[in-house]
């Protein structure tokens, strides 16, 4: 699909419901080195629950067009691509689910276009640069440069773009000017309920980071999963998927059961 003058790989699944005109929709946004294939364990579950699922390779990833650099940390180009993509597909409102960089992108979009987002699930997103990020990013660099298995996995997903995908991500997050970045002042603009998800053993952020995110949101709910790392949706799908579906609720009655499922100590609270 041509979006803002570039080709993006878009996959739409699920059956159109005439009663809701063209929805209900959930949009899936992948992590910083991923693609739409990262959601292969979630898409079928969402479709089975009655959702129409839109997943796409962001510009520069997977089967989308190459990209010279990422617009980090604000994801300005990606926010504009998402808005244009929703317009082109006729999606007026949608629930958003984003993982890592995709989660940060979802938050930026919801802050800029609050009327278009019904619910948001943010998994392992960053809202400022934490000390734990640097060793995590360096660990990924070492794997890319010394582990043929890791490189081949990226090549299977991104083809000839694998090297540029990696260094766009690595160089983008290593820019010195990003050290002072903090998006928390924008989060008060997010009008929809947000489920903030993070593994307690996340390699790139501490649990406190997720707490700060939930606290900065008008309607943020926190779920810290013990024993889970950064790739929680892929590694813990059997636990993640039921909670995802509970929070999103039945199509047309989004969130009807989510409030009952969140324990008191998981709601945002003062530190």
Image (cartoon, rainbow, N blue to C red):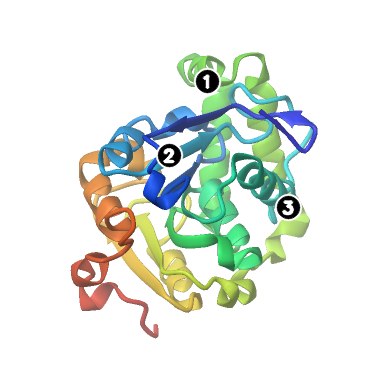
Image x and y of residue 271, in percent: 39, 83
Report the front residue among 132 and 21: 21
Instruction: Look at the numbered disc 2 and give the secondary structure of its residue.
Output: strand
Residue beneath label 1, please? 157
Task: Say left or right for 177 vs 130.
Answer: right
Using the rendered view, name the quadrant where residue 126 is placed. Answer: bottom right
Looking at the image, which residue is at 66% across and 65% down? 112
Task: Say left or right for 58 vs 215.
Answer: right
Image x and y of residue 202, in percent: 39, 50
Instruction: Look at the numbered disc 1 and give the secondary structure of its residue.
Output: helix
| Label at residue 259 | none
Report the front residue among 229 and 68: 68
Image x and y of residue 158, in percent: 59, 20
Q: Is residue 19 above or below residue 41?
A: below
Mark 2 or mark 1, which is nearer to you? Answer: 2
Mark 2 or mark 3, which is nearer to you? Answer: 2
Residue beneath label 3, please? 76
């Amino acid at each position: 699909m041509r979006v803002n003058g570039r080709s993006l790989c878009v996959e739409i699944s699920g059956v159109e419901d005439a009663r809701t005109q063209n929805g209900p929709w959930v949009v899936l946004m992948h992590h910083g080195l991923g693609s739409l294939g990262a959601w292969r364990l979630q898409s079928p579950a969402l479709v089975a629950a009655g959702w129409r699922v839109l997943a796409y390779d962001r510009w520069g990833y997977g089967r989308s067009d190459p990209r010279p650099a990422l617009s980090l940390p604000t994801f300005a180009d990606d926010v504009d691509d998402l808005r244009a993509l929703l317009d082109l597909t006729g999606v007026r409102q949608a629930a958003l689910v984003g993982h890592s960089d995709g989660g940060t992108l979802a938050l930026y979009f919801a802050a800029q276009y609050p009327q278009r987002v019904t619910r948001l699930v943010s998994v392992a997103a960053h809202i400022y640069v934490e000390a734990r990020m640097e060793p995590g990013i360096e660990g990924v660099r070492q794997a890319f440069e010394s582990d043929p298995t890791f490189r081949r996995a990226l090549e299977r997903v991104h083809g000839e773009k694998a090297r540029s995908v990696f260094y766009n991500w690595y160089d983008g997050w290593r820019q010195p000017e990003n050290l002072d970045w903090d998006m928390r002042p924008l989060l008060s603009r997010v009008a929809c309920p947000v489920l903030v998800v993070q593994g307690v053993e996340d390699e790139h952020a501490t649990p406190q980071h997720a707490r700060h995110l939930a606290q900065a949101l008008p309607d943020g709910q926190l779920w810290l999963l013990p024993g889970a790392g950064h790739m929680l949706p892929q590694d813990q799908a059997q636990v993640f998927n039921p909670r995802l579906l509970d929070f999103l609720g039945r199509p047309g009655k989004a969130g009807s059961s989510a409030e009952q499922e969140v324990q008191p100590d998981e709601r945002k609270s003062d530190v």
